[in-house]
Structure formats: structure tokens, C-alpha cells
Amino acid sequence: MKLPLVELHLHIEGTLEPELLFELAERNAVTLPWASLDELRAQYDFADLQSFLDLYYRALDVVRERIDFADLTRAYLARARTAGVRHAEIFFDPQAHTSRGVPLGTALAGVRDALDRSVDEWGITTKLIVTFLRDRPADEALQILREILADGVAIDGIGLDSAEVGYPPALFTEVFDLARAHGLRLVAHAGEEGPPDYVWQALDLLGVERIDHGIRSLEDEALLDRLVRDRVPLTVCPFSNVRLRVIDTLADHPIVRMLDRGLLACINSDDPAYFGGYIDDNLAALDAEFDLGPDRLALLARNGIEASFLTPAEKAALLDEVETWLTARREPASGPATAIRSS
Ligand code: HPA
Ligand code: ZN
């Protein structure tokens, strides 16, 4: 049995693997600036968030038709299934597509095609969270949200992503007010590269229910008190933090400190095609680095379940499965000592 996982911080655009990228380039007759897979992979050496985003948006040029969006989403779900993911709340960036002439309806329909079959095909329940690019005008986000609501496309929530510093949450209050009025769930990237003040703003001005990343919250004790008191989840992405140089090495990652401080932190993959691995790879690397062991792996899995937008009954069912996994790990005769991946 695999540890049952929930993934809450995953940009579907960030799951575009080099092989699929080349396949879609051929399908859509797009001329790429990279001659080979190796030449493309050589670009995956990022100085910071912006240098990653430049490549991330550029690579999307190959994703054009409804079927491309469905194929991209299906490829993620297939890989997530092997990781033990049972529920995924997936980010989708409309402006990364509308800004290059792909109609919103085309992109969203393709993603929905894959998500609508996800339970049957992969045994994975999903939610869809539309994320707005904070380095573009709030009015544009508002326009797109109105369009989605008018078209009746099934989305579950909204979030905020892209270049953080200089684009505080306060700019987006109107967008989040509209989403709240329509019963959508609210999340935002904050405290990745930006200061703790952006986390405060996301909580107090946008009313978000989860903070994506939030790693810089560790610089503000009063903020930590607030996050612990209100059990505000932080969707932490260790490989992303290393690759985007938020921290130097995985050994410097504060995840254990975060858990010890009582934060509701869970592990996620962010943009797995670019950052060196999926959710299971992140957990396995943390386990190797910090010797987490079955108890803390189970704690991280439980935190993800609690932090999700699943119903109480759905959460309870997954939590039961985590306990079953843990019991098997505590009785070595019935299973291997540590195994995120063992089946
Ligand atoms: N941070 C901000 N925006 C993003 C990211 C990220 O890690 N990935 C995709 N868009
Ligand atoms: Zn992210």
C-alpha cells in the first residue's frame, strides 16, 4: 500500500515534461528554440522565480488546442497516480494562454476533459483552482473571472501566482471579493520570495484559506502565532524552493522546523517537470535528508488531507487509510521499514 497523498500546490502548466513539449511542438508545427531534449533541459538552471517563469511561459507556446490541454492534464494524473496521489487541487493560469491568443474556453475545456474523467481513469478526485498572474493588472483578472462565471465553467477556487515581489495581495481585493461572493475557495501564493507582510495581506485583505509556499512566514513570530492558532495551511514545495533559490540546499529546508512549530504544512511539487520531481520524489528526498520516518511522513500526509477542500467525510476516509499505512510501517514484519513508493 502506498501512502495516500493529497496534492494542493500544482501548476498544471508546470507538469509539461520535455518529451511532451517536443511531441506537441511537432503536432502543432511549432519551431522550438531548443534543438534537443538535452538542450531544453540545460535551461532548467534557474537564478530565481522570474528566470523560471520566463521559460515556463515560453514553453507553453506548444500547448494550443483543447486536446493538448487534455493530454497535458492526463499526463500529470497518470504520474500522480503512481505517486499515490488520491486527490489533487490543480492550479490553472488562464492568462498564460489568453495572452498568446489561445481562447480561455479552449484551454479550460481541455483541462476539464481530463479532470472530468479522472476518478474513473486514475481513481483521483480533483478540484480546479484558477490562478491569476499578479504581475498583470487586477482588472484583467477580474474580467477573466467574470467570463468564467458567466460561462458556467466548473471551477472550485481562485489563487494568485507569478512574480511576487512588487505585486502585493492588496492589489487583488476586488477579485477575491467577487470569488467569495460566488462561493469559490480562496488561496494565494505569498511569502515565497515576498515578505511576511504579503502573507498578512493575503489573510487579512483577501481572506484566503491557504497560503501557497509561505516559507518566509518563519521570519515573523507574530505571523507564525496567527498561522498556528488558525491552523492556516501552508502548501510547501521543497524542490521548488531549492531550484528557485529560496533556500540554498535541501538540507537547509525548514520543513522540520515548521512542523515542530505546529504549522499545518504539507508537501507539494509546484512545477514538477521543471524542479526535479513529483510529490513522491519530494517526500522521498526529505525522508532521506531528515530521516522523517513513517510518523512524520504520515503527519505530512494528514496535513495535506486536512488542508484540502474535500468534505469532512472524504477527509475521514483518507485519514483512515493513512492510519492503515502507518500501522503497517510500525509493524515491520508486515511491510518494509520506510516506503513512500512501496506498493
Ligand atoms: N511561484 C509563483 N508563480 C508560479 C510558480 C511559483 O512557484 N509556478 C508557476 N507559477
Ligand atoms: Zn506555485
Image (cartoon, helix red, strand yellow):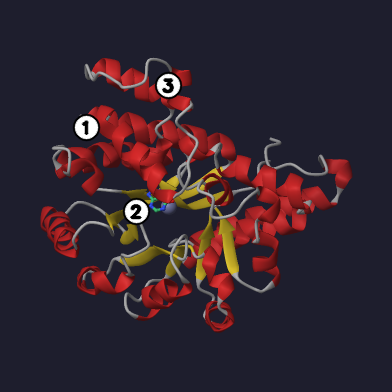
Query: Foreground residue, 169 or 320?
Result: 169
Residue 235 visible in the displayed image = yes
Question: Picture coordinates of residue 172 (x, y %)?
Answer: 25, 69
Residue at mark 1 = 66
Disc 2 marks which residue? Answer: 162
- Residue depicted at x 50% and y 65%: 214
Callout 1: CB less than 8 Å from ligand 1: no
Q: Amino acid at mark 1?
A: Arg
Report the side of 289 relative to 194 (left or right). Answer: right
Q: Are marks 1 and 2 in contact (CB under 8 Å)?
A: no
Q: Quadrant of residue 163?
A: bottom left
Q: Earlier in the sequence, mark 1 or mark 2?
A: 1
Which secondary structure lies at badge 1?
helix
Q: Is mark 2 within 8 Å of ligand 1?
A: yes
Q: Percent position (x, y) of residue 339?
A: 74, 41
Q: Give the residue furthest to the right.
A: 333
Q: Which residue is mark 3?
A: 19
Dots 3, 2 in contact, CB < 8 A? no
Q: Amino acid at mark 3?
A: Glu
